[in-house]
Image (cartoon, helix red, strand yellow):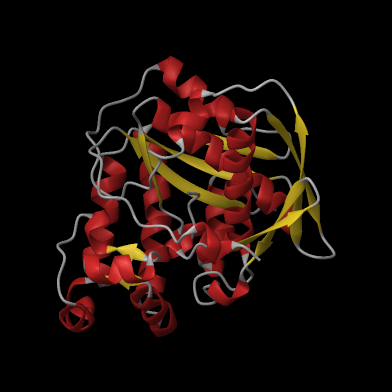
Amino acid sequence: MAPSSHNTQCWKFAQQGSGLTILPDLSRRCPAVDPDDHHVFVTLGCAVENLAHTALTHGLHAEARFDATLNAIHVALAPTPAQASPLFQAIAARQCTRGDYDGKPLSNEELKLLERAGTSNGVRMLLLTECPVMERVLDYVLQGNTAQMADAAFVKELKSWIRFNGTDAVRTRDGLFSVSSGSPAIPDWLGQLAFGWFVNAKGENEKCARQIRNSAGLAVFVGEAADKAHWVEVGRAYERFALQATALGIRNAFLNQPVEVAAVRSPFAAALGLTGQRPDLVVRFGRGPTLPPSLRRPVESVMA
């Protein structure tokens, strides 16, 4: 139930004694958008966070440790009093809502809860709600988006993960179901033809500008170091943020173009006062409608 780039679900779970090991499934990686597997390990962190909240509900404390030798996360489970937190209850409802939001600001208390959820010892979260700052971020989103739309490999990879109708979405149970982004369901052959007509730099830039401007704010996640262990921690921090947002009735979605395009990433970091650091995720948030969820593969298909 965790988020993943293009909904690739790039994880494997293996039972290990009384615990679990979470491994990257590199057969489902996206080399065009994620050449260094940054998003893969962020995704594993999201899965760890979901696992920790679920374990607690079943009376188990989850202690996660990143194994740099195996590029895996070992999760030890020990008995503890059971507790069903609001974050656990939000797991099934959480989604990356790629539609428009209502443009209304959040309360100070809501922003404090989001900031608390998205911050940890190894991860800093910048909460941006002022229009001039959001417009500055938009400039870098547009630069990144324009570069990606001009990259044939990126476009081909994105297209390969689009599920244009319910039949294909149910068959694969992965990828980006077009209806989940507010687009109509159409036959696959028509989607393959129409993709290049409707998904282009101009249209996507206009959508990004509109959606940043109707968001209540932006969150930028920054790990203390640019390594896999910290990318996992970024994923855990983001997932707490997303679950807390869901519990409050707040939607969120990624706008990661400025951190995915290497030529844009450093200037973007400098504009945020993060010179020498790597911003990991850019997320917009606000209130908006629920859209149909992207599907998930069955448990047996993700067990190693």
Q: Nearer the viewer, residue 30 or 60?
A: 60
Q: Examine the image and state in which quarter residue 34 appears.
A: bottom right
Q: Nearer the viewer, residue 195 or 274?
A: 195
Dividing the image into 4 quarters, which one contains the C terminus?
bottom right
Q: Is residue 152 visible?
A: yes
Q: How many marks?
A: 0
Residue 149 in the image: above or below residue 281: below
Q: Position of residue 121 (x, y in %)?
A: 73, 34
Q: Position of residue 252 (x, y in %)?
A: 38, 41
Residue furthest to the right: 69
Q: Is residue 30 left or right of residue 64?
A: left
Q: Examine the image and state in which quarter residue 181 appears.
A: bottom left
Q: Is residue 273 visible?
A: no
Q: Is residue 253 left or right of residue 37?
A: left
Question: Which residue appears at 34% of the width and 63% of the height?
Answer: 176
Q: Nearer the viewer, residue 275 or 84?
A: 84
Q: Position of residue 164 (x, y in %)?
A: 23, 70
Question: Which residue appears at 31% of the width and 45% of the height?
Answer: 212
Q: Is residue 281 left or right of residue 227?
A: left
Q: Position of residue 42 (x, y in %)?
A: 60, 54
Question: Which residue appears at 50% of the width and 62% of the height?
Answer: 9
Q: Examine the image and state in which quarter residue 68 appears.
A: bottom right
